[in-house]
Image (cartoon, rainbow, N blue to C red):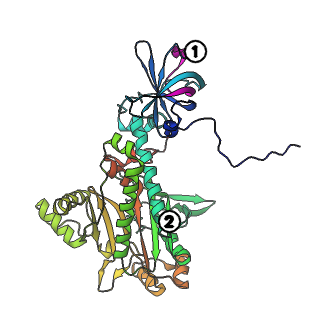
């Protein structure tokens, strides 16, 4: 029997596109997909799509034995090329193709043209043909920026000593109430898909002090809107030993400030390709819910409607007013009515009709909900009972309170909404790789 040791080394024979500048004057092998073939007189440009970049190569019949006619767009290839200094090119070098090895030829061309500036089709078709349309440079850039956001968030939270956790998505009951719960038959028992990691992240505050999770959550939204998905990625955090809910708003301000700065640095080419502007955050203004409602009603020239929540139009108007007044594209709305917030929200002891909570709006839309939670066992049981809820249904959650929990709070931020607002995408579906809505479970 032969036993082999696999070394912990990544000595690949291919040069990464991002490192090509270090190879000027040498011959390299590079792999990627043929994004675009542009035939000129006497030569051709072969644009390769690699993991994160587009690499332009030059093909001349005299230098390369491979017949260009045999090369189809979207073929996966390994190219051997000379890296030559070229001051006229933006990269500062040019790749002269010497050999092309085709690793896979597509069985058919993409169902829609993907190698133009934009994919010229309807939103539905864009989403139906995702395997192809995500290959478009702009569509892909959205998700490179989204990955950059997650990287920035993780770096910030890990620096602030938050522990990353992974909580179950198959759960026994809803954490957020409301009608938008997906019910499941779990081997004959009733279960559902997690609406949020809320109850678990609170339980884990008793263990780790500070936790975060970036993961999928599920909401059975029946309405077809441009801001709701049925499965979205929630950036959740929970922090113990807070001295008030404003500490959470400061934390979110610092987190977004640091994350957007790191995204601007890491994703410069994608951001400019998408024509997005990344705000610099030094501080975020905050207004009280009641005052925001009145301000918006005045601006819209009507009375206050739905005194419990902000309507989408009101969120847009409020953002415009705040931006005009302060220059900020973000605004915190604080102290939402207790009647509108879930059972775990801490009411203001001075005014129990209000919660010690907030939403964060960005460019006209809510992207975050957060607040302080009830940490005292008797108080939490009392609030559940006051709402006519059965405390025994929450025994596992309440076990954490029973064992003692520090004063704590946290927030949940919708990753797709943040991405969409940041990149100026009208529909949140554009910021989900494979969105789930009432009419869509494929691809
Ligand atoms: P909430 O239910 O307000 O709060 O959700 C938090 C954030 O998640 C995003 N969001 C959605 N994004 C896309 N599609 C949806 N259907 C959808 N629903 C919500 C929004 C929203 O601001 N447990 C609390 C958070 C907390 O207090 O920690 C919660 O889930 O951006």
Q: Secondary structure at mark 1?
A: loop
On the image, the x and y values in percent for residue 158 come to 50, 65
Left or right: residue 342 versus residue 63 is: left
Q: Residue furthest right?
A: 1
On the image, the x and y values in percent for residue 377 come to 48, 85
Q: Secondary structure at mark 2?
A: helix
Identify the residue position indicated by label 2 in the image: 158
Magenta region, residue range: 67-85
Q: Is residue 69 magenta?
A: yes
Q: Which residue is at the front of the view, 95 or 335?
A: 95
On the image, the x and y values in percent for residue 31 come to 56, 32
Q: For the point 34% across and 77% down, which residue is it?
A: 356
Left or right: residue 438 versus residue 164 is: left
- Disc number for residue 52: none
On the image, the x and y values in percent for residue 135 come to 46, 35
Choose top left, top right, bottom left or bottom right for residue 255.
bottom left
Choose top left, top right, bottom left or bottom right for residue 251.
bottom left
Q: Earlier in the sequence, mark 2 or mark 1?
A: 1
Q: Is residue 16 magenta?
A: no
Determine the CA span between mark 2 and mark 1. 52 Å
Is ligand 1 closer than 8 angstroms to the Cβ of mark 1?
Answer: no
Q: Which residue is at the front of the view, 185 or 299?
A: 299
Q: How many marks?
A: 2
Identify the residue position indicated by label 1 in the image: 65
Q: Residue furthest left?
A: 301
């Amino acid at each position: 029997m032969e036993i082999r040791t696999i070394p912990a080394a990544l000595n690949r024979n291919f040069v990464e596109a991002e490192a090509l500048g270090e190879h000027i004057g040498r011959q390299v092998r590079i792999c990627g997909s043929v994004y675009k073939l542009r035939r000129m007189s006497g030569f051709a440009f072969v644009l390769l799509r690699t993991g994160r970049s587009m690499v332009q190569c030059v093909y001349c019949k005299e230098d390369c034995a491979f017949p260009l006619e045999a090369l189809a767009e979207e073929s996966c290839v390994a190219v051997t090329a000379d890296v030559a200094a070229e001051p006229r090119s933006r990269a500062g070098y040019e790749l002269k193709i010497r050999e092309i090895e085709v690793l896979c030829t597509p069985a058919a061309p993409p169902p829609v043209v993907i190698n133009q500036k934009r994919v010229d089709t309807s939103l539905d078709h864009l989403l139906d043909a995702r395997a192809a349309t995500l290959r478009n440079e702009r569509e892909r850039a959205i998700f490179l920026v989204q990955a950059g956001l997650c990287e920035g968030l993780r770096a910030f939270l890990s620096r602030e000593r938050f522990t990353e956790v992974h909580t179950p998505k198959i759960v026994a009951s809803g954490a957020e109430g409301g009608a938008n719960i997906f019910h499941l038959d779990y081997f004959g028992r009733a279960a559902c898909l997690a609406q949020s990691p809320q109850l678990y992240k609170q339980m884990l505050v008793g263990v780790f002090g500070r936790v975060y999770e970036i993961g999928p959550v599920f909401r059975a939204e029946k309405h077809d809107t441009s801001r709701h998905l049925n499965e979205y990625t929630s950036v959740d955090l929970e922090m113990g030993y807070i001295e008030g809910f404003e500490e959470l708003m400061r934390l979110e301000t610092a987190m977004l400030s640091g994350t957007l700065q790191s995204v601007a640095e890491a994703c410069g080419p994608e951001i400019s390709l998408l024509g997005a502007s990344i705000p610099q955050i030094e501080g975020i203004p905050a207004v009280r819910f009641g005052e925001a409602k009145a301000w918006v009603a005045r601006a819209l020239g009507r009375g206050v409607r739905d005194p419990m929540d902000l309507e989408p139009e009101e969120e847009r108007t409020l953002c415009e007013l705040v931006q005009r007044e302060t220059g900020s594209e973000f605004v915190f709305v604080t102290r939402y009515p207790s009647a509108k917030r879930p059972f775990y929200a801490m009411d203001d002891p001075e005014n129990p009709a209000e919660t010690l909570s907030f939403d964060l709006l960005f460019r006209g839309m809510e992207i975050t909900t957060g607040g302080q939670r009830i940490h005292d066992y008797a108080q939490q049981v009392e609030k559940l009972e006051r709402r006519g809820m059965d405390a025994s249904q929450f025994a596992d959650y309440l076990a954490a309170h029973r064992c003692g929990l520090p004063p704590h709070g946290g927030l949940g931020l919708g990753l797709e909404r943040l991405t969409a607002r940041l990149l100026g995408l009208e529909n949140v579906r554009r910021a989900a790789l494979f969105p789930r809505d009432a009419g869509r479970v494929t691809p």
